[in-house]
Structures are given as C-alpha cells and as structure tokens.
Amino acid sequence: MRLKIKPEKLLLAALIILALPPIQHFLEQSMVTHMLVQLPALTVIGWMLGRALPENWSNKIAPWNRWGITGMTFVVIIMAYWMLPRALDAAVSEWHIELAKFISVPAMGIALGISWPQLNPIAQGVLKLEFWATFMRLGWLYLDLPDRLCANYLLSDQRIMGQLLLLIGSAWAIAWMLRVMFGIRIINT
C-alpha cells in the first residue's frame, strides 16, 4: 500500500524546516546564504503553493488580479523591501521582522505563481529586464561601497554577495543573448 502525500503538505513541511532555529540560523549567518538560498527557497515554496491552489480559489481572486497586474505589483514591492540591507538586518535581529519575512516572502511566491502566467509577454519581458537590472545594480553597490550596508554581516561577505550577484546577472544576460540571437535555450527565462 502506497502512501500518497499531497504536494501542498510537502511544501508546508519544507517551510517549517526552513523556519526551524538551527536551519534558520545556519542560513542567516551569511549574507550569501540569506539572500541566495533562504529567500529564494521561501519564494519557490510560495510559488509552488500558488501553482497548486485549486482553480476555484484562483477564480475567486481573479477580479482583483486582472492580467496578473495586482499580484505582480505585490511581488515587486515585497521583493524590493527584502533587498534592502536594513530589512535583512532587522530579520536577523528582531523576531517580528523574521516572522514577517516567513509570511511575506512565501506570499510573494504565491502571488508570483498565480500572476506570472496571466501577464502579457511584453510585461513579462519588462519585469525580467528589471529583475536582471536589479541584480546588476545591487551587485555593483555591494561590491563598490567601502562601508558595510548590513550591520550583521562583514564587509567581505557583502563583497562576495556583490560578486555573486554580478556573476548571476551576467550569466542571465548571456543566456538571454544566446536565446535571442541563436535560439539556444540554456534555461527557461
């Protein structure tokens, strides 16, 4: 007899595991793992929950999310907030901000999962370009500033984060160029 576990339960279990103090502390002890592992993992969990929602639930919110615009506005606002160095510091230092992160980032993922497919391809392209530009701007900022932006992280950690953001942004740009110029799909962007 096979046990059938619903994907939603697995996703909620993954969210709980990420919230466990040892895992949470491990991921938040470095700016790199905080921004490039924990936050994306919370977003992906939310995105998968959003994609797994029953269709009738999606239909109930459809009048407020026409063409995915409302949901994507929510995504952009939440993403912009959690990219602020002060927000990262507060999440490490203050329990209520940490709780807000564990609620808002998966909620952003849910909105992304519901709203992205509804967006016009031109709007998707504009948002992809803006996300890429944000990676490049933050990478440059983290790498070039002589002072620490996050009180909880070392300057060397900030510089590594800047290098990684520039590397990821550059790889993303190369993948787009190969797709546009030669039709080669490295990743689904």
Image (spheres, grey):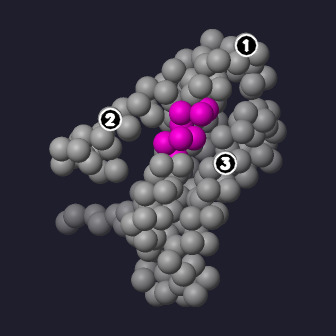
Question: For numbered disc 1, what is the local secondary structure?
Answer: loop
Read off the residue under disc 3: 80
Residue in the picture at 76% in, 16% down: 147
Read off the residue under disc 1: 146
Q: Is residue 82 above or below residue 13?
A: above
Between the C-alphas of marks 3 and 1, the distance is 23 Å
Amino acid type of the residue tagged 1 in the rendering: Pro
Residue 70 located left or right of residue 48: right
Residue 71 place in picture, x, y as percent: 58, 69
Q: Earlier in the sequence, mark 3 or mark 1?
A: 3
Q: In this view, does 30 lie above or below 125?
A: above
Q: What stretch is highlighted in magenta?
A: 131-138
Q: Which of marks 1 and 2 is nearer the N terminus?
A: 1
Question: For numbered disc 2, what is the local secondary structure?
Answer: helix
Residue in the picture at 18% in, 44% down: 182
Mark identifier at residue 99: none
Q: In which quarter of the image is the N terminus?
A: bottom left
Residue 28 place in picture, x, y as percent: 63, 30
Residue in the picture at 53% in, 49% down: 130
Amino acid type of the residue tagged 2 in the rendering: Ile
Amino acid type of the residue tagged 3 in the rendering: Ala
Question: For numbered disc 3, what is the local secondary structure?
Answer: helix
Read off the residue under disc 2: 174
Q: How crowded is mark 1: few (under 14 residues within 10 Å), some or many (20 or more)?
A: few
Residue 121 place in picture, x, y as percent: 39, 66
Can see residue 73?
yes
Task: State whether the magenta stretch is mostly helix, strand or loop.
Answer: helix
